[in-house]
Amino acid sequence: MLAAGGVALVAAFQKGPDILAAFGSEFEFEPSPVDGFRQIAGGSSSTGSFDPFVGLDRDKVAIPAELVATVERNLCSTLFEDTGTGDVPVASFSDYNCPYCRILTRDLGRIAQEGGVTVSWHELPLLGETSIAAAKAALAAKRQGAYTEFHERLLRTAFVTTPEFLRLIADDIGVDYEQLRRDIDSPKIEDELERSKALAQIFRFSATPAMVVGRTVVIGVVGEARLRSLIELERQEGRVERCFV
């Protein structure tokens, strides 16, 4: 099933050969599993020891087909949650136990602070129970407006995700820990993780880090200079807006 925005992007992809020629020597584009998107290979990545497309709850055996279908119908709005007008949208998928995610998140965060880029952070915990616990804690912090701070602290710290550790972070950045603890167990957190996993299934992400920069999929870590070039290419082509039509 094709995403609604994907058909529009297929037509848009035919435009702008002059721009593609200018950047063609740097990027080797391949077809993406999703129509209207293209793909480039990045560098190293971290792969979990279990099937990433099995539900996060052990009682679940798969992501519900109806959820995947809903995400496909609303692909761009689910992928790029908070895109600013005129910004290049980036969707980042990471795991707190993935060392390559730490590098890419640092670089992407620095680029985003300069403006002109809007990042939607998606939790994709593939590396075990501590990854899942950290992802849920970060999404719980998001409900108190502290996702970015919590996300950065988790990524730059060698940690064991225990209640005591999470309380220390919460107290340090001014998050209500008791509310955080309640939200961690909320069905809404599970739903958000499931939506990100549905996106991962659609794009066939089985490792982290992974990104969608405009209409280009990147699997694996990529250097900051190359990432900036890709963002600039997407900005010049200026066709990702059609994804939301």
Image (cartoon, grey):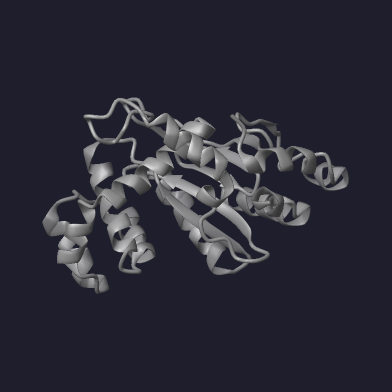
Placement of 188 over or under 33, stated as above or below: below
In the picture as drawn, the residue positioned furthest to the bottom comes out as 174
In the picture as drawn, the residue positioned furthest to the right comes out as 18
The answer to whether one can see residue 45 in this image is: no
Placement of 182 over or under 95, stated as above or below: below
Can you say which quadrant of the picture contains the N terminus?
A: top right
Identify the residue at horizontal 34%, vertical 62% (top origin). Answer: 142
Of residues 110 and 55, the one drawn nearer to the viewer in this rendering: 55
Of residues 107 and 150, the one drawn nearer to the viewer in this rendering: 150
Identify the residue at horizontal 50%, vertical 34% (top origin). Answer: 69
Residue 216 in the image: x percent, y percent?
64, 42
Q: Quadrant of residue 27?
A: top right
Identify the residue at horizontal 22%, vertical 51% (top origin). Answer: 159
Identify the residue at horizontal 49%, vertical 60% (top origin). Answer: 109
The answer to whether one can see residue 17 in this image is: yes
Q: Quadrant of residue 6?
A: top right
Left or right of 115 on screen, residue 161? left
Q: Quadrant of residue 126?
A: top left
Q: How many marks?
A: 0
In the picture as drawn, the residue positioned furthest to the left comes out as 164
Residue 212 in the image: x percent, y percent?
57, 45
Residue 21 in the image: x percent, y percent?
84, 42
Residue 226 in the image: x percent, y percent?
64, 48
Left or right of 186 on screen, residue 116? right
Left or right of 179 on screen, residue 123? right
